[in-house]
Image (spheres, helix red, strand yellow):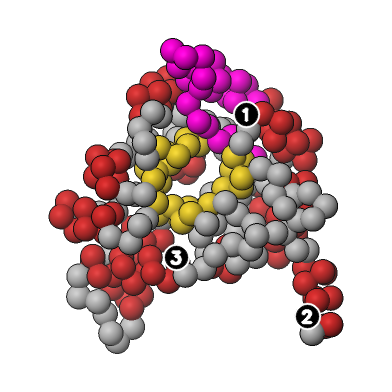
């Protein structure tokens, strides 16, 4: 499984470069703040790029012109370490709005050879499963975004909705029919439960700056705190197949 650490990481350029180079890591680079992209493109194992829609939505200034993002993606998509881009989406928007953005992605990121930049559309958990099936028909990777009444990952309602989504995304054996990327889903309790190809979070970037999170034995530098957080996150791997909770309980009772 690929653990994408969200950037920018903060701190000195030297400490960022050291963190990127060591550990065989993957990173997510947001279009609105690509400060770390040069070192990530040069020295990471791979990177994906985020459209910044969630941050813009939270700020009360949603994106209305995606042209610069399309241009940026077509510029970087042939890089050897490029993995995929998160296709633009309307947070809290209707399915028709988001379907139009998926169509626009294919039209606006077409390359000279007729292919398109690798993009992963977002299926928001409050949307219909019909839309999830439609996205699966044309996409190799599907991003899952927490939204609406399921905006907080890890709640009981969120897990119930995720379980229903897995029934759509996986075949009768529990094997994913498409690669699944979890947006804001690097919590080990989530990763260990679902057959994710990859997931991302900004945990390392945010919490490496908060000394209060480390108890009595505080790593003295931000670079060391990054390593502590990343090592814990990266120890958790997703399962190879989807096993519903009821089935898991049945297996445990047999044991």
- Label 1 element class: helix
Return the mark for residue 252.
2
Choose between 18 and 80: the one closer to the eye: 80
Measure the C-alpha gap from mark 1 to mark 2: 41 Å
User: How would you rate the neighbour count of disc 1 (Cα within 10 Å): few for under 14, some for 14-19, many for 20 or more?
Assistant: many
Return the mark for residue 234.
3
Judge depth for marks 1 and 2 and give the one in front: 2
Which residues lie in the magenta part?
98-123
Whichever of callouts 1 and 3 sits on the residue coming sooner in the sequence is 1
Measure the C-alpha gap from mark 3 to mark 2: 26 Å
Q: Is residue 240 visible?
A: yes
Identified at 45% across, 66% down, the residue is 233
Measure the C-alpha gap from mark 1 to mark 3: 32 Å
Identified at 44% across, 12% down, the residue is 112
Return the mark for residue 98.
1
The x and y percentages for residue 48 are 43, 41
Whichever of callouts 3 and 2 sits on the residue coming sooner in the sequence is 3
């Amino acid at each position: 499984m690929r653990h994408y650490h969200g950037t920018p990481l903060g701190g000195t350029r030297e400490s960022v470069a050291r963190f990127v180079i060591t550990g065989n890591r993957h990173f997510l680079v947001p279009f609105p703040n690509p400060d770390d992209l040069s070192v990530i493109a040069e020295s990471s194992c791979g990177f994906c790029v985020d459209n910044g829609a969630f941050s813009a939505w939270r700020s009360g200034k949603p994106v209305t012109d995606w042209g610069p993002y399309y241009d940026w993606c077509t510029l970087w998509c042939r890089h050897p370490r490029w993995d995929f881009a998160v296709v633009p989406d309307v947070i809290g928007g209707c399915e028709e709005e988001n379907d139009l953005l998926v169509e626009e992605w294919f039209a606006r990121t077409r390359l000279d050879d007729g292919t398109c930049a690798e993009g992963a559309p977002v299926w928001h958990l409050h949307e219909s499963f019909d839309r999830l099936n439609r996205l699966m028909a044309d996409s190799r990777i599907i991003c899952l975004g927490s939204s609406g009444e399921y905006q907080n990952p890890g709640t009981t309602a969120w897990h119930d909705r995720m379980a229903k989504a897995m029934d759509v995304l996986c075949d009768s054996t529990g094997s994913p029919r498409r690669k699944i990327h979890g947006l804001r889903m690097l919590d080990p309790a989530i990763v260990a439960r679902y057959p994710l190809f990859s997931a991302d979070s900004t945990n390392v970037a945010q919490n490496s700056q908060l000394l209060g999170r480390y108890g009595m034995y505080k790593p003295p530098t931000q670079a060391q705190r990054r390593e502590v957080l990343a090592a814990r996150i990266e120890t958790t791997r997703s399962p190879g197949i989807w096993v519903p909770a009821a089935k898991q309980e049945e297996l445990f009772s047999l044991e």
